[in-house]
Image (cartoon, helix red, strand yellow):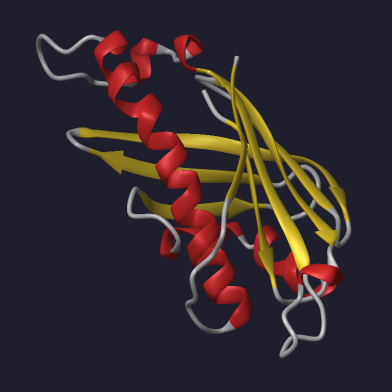
Amino acid sequence: MDRILLSTVAYRSPEEVFPYVCSFTDYPRYTDHLKEVRVHGDGGVGSVYDLRLAWWKLSYTARSKVVEVTESESLEWRLVDHLDARGEWRVEPEPEAAPPEAETASRIYFEALYDPHSADKSVLSLPRFVSIDWVISKVRPRLLDEAQTVVERLVADIEGQRRDVELTIHEMP
């Protein structure tokens, strides 16, 4: 299993941050490769999200399910078909990280665990002479960049303006 774990600080309370983390339908604004999100459910435990991704000549719809929610603290998800992947968004109070002009701060963690070799090759229509191993070798290094972009844009949304965001990479493939 590969693992990405990164975090950053948003200058808001966990109660203010958490609704943004849970709003998967807003995620296409945070990344260039997520084109559309469709929700089946109310957003809580058991809700399923169809995430239509596109990169290079490939497009794929991942189906993600919310498996656990601890209000203002954690949202756990897993993919339900075609790839062994799961993860969590976690928000923890970190008031000591707030600058003088902010009332408080929270640390936002993004974690994803996935086995790239578990991808169901039959759901991807690869161009002729392109192997799944080649696709994995190209996508794997991009995943960390994508995670960073999502977190940076998420913080801008939460705070209402862009700023330089310091990302801490705790683990990467």
Looking at the image, residue 66 lies above or below residue 23? above
Residue that appears at 43% across and 13% down: 120
Q: Quadrant of residue 71?
A: bottom right
Is residue 37 toward the left or the right of residue 89 in the image?
left
Where is residue 135? Give x, y as percent.
Answer: 28, 19
Looking at the image, residue 59 lies above or below residue 37: above
Q: Quadrant of residue 160?
A: bottom right
Name the side, left or right, on which 154 lies relative to 19: left
162 or 135, which is in the foreground? 162
Identify the residue at image location x=66%, y=29%: 86
Task: Look at 72% across and 80% down and name the residue there.
Answer: 99
Picture mark count? 0
Residue shown at 13% from the left, 19% from the top: 127
State the image coordinates of residue 81 (x, y, percent, origin top left).
56, 23
Q: Is residue 80 visible?
A: no
Outermost residue, bottom direction?
Answer: 101
Which residue occupies the foreground of this view, 142 or 21? 142
Query: Can residue 12 be seen?
Result: yes
In percent of width and height, residue 18 lies at 76, 64
Quarter of the rendering occupied by the N terminus: top right
Q: Nearer the viewer, residue 102 or 21?
A: 102
Image height of 98 relative to 53, above or below: below
